[in-house]
Image: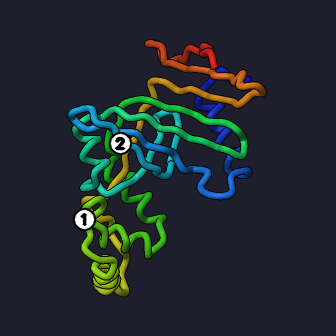
Amino acid sequence: MSNDPFALFDTWYAEARTSEPNDSNAMALATADADGRPSVRMVLLKGHGRDGFVFYTNRGSRKAGELAANPHVALLFHWKSLRRQIRIEGPVAPVTDAESDAYFATRSRDSQLGAWASDQSRPLDARATFEARFDAARARFDGQEVTRPPFWGGYRVTPQRIEFWQDRAHRLHERRLFTPAADGTWHEGLLYP
């Protein structure tokens, strides 16, 4: 049993990648606006390590506005096939342009074009409007590399609390909570189910 939350995350995540039928990297991202009104949606984990957990989005989206107004979030990974979940809470900040550029370059061309075509979270009058914008982006970048839009990039969540939840019979679940100490180590404790 690991007492290092990052090593334990790596182990559970590797197991989820082999057992989950779809999007083992899917995580619920909970944000709140400046007035404390919550919002939650699914995003995809695109990088992780001791420095945090990274996802990408349109920086003009509703979630990006909420991140700017209240840069504290909660993440939830739920792997039903393993009967496990991981909860992560902490502050969030934009990743560097270089990191966003590097990840954007790994996306499929259509996903890159879709980033240019979408005014994410804004009202859309008709699907045809979005499809026309996608076609315009395809024409604009015909025969050339699709560069990252300046309004699109990543965010890193720096964990201040990581909880590992494991289902057990009769709802006698196991909950392990990790919190950071001032010296950079992590304290582990248990929570009642």
Picture coordinates of residue 23 (x, y %)? 59, 55
Residue holding disc 2: 39
Instruction: In the rendered view, tell whether residue 160 sits above or below residue 46.
Output: above
- At mark 1, the secondary structure is loop
Is residue 61 found left or right of 166 in the rendered image? Answer: left
Q: Which of marks 1 and 2 is nearer the N terminus?
A: 2
- At mark 2, the secondary structure is strand
Instruction: Quarter of the image for the C terminus: give it.
Output: top right
Q: In which quarter of the image is residue 169?
A: top right
Residue holding disc 1: 123
Give residue 139's mark.
none
Is residue 103 found left or right of 11 in the rendered image? Answer: left
Instruction: In the rendered view, tell whether residue 163 sits above or below residue 34.
Output: above
Give the residue at x 37% y 74%: 113
Give the residue at x 61% y 36%: 85
Question: For the residues marked 1 and 2, what is the alpha-carbon distance in whole angstroms?
Answer: 17 Å
Three-letter code, disc 1 = Pro
Three-letter code, disc 2 = Ser
Instruction: Quarter of the image for the N terminus: give it.
Output: top right
Picture coordinates of residue 44 (x, y %)? 49, 52
Give the residue at x 57% y 50%: 25
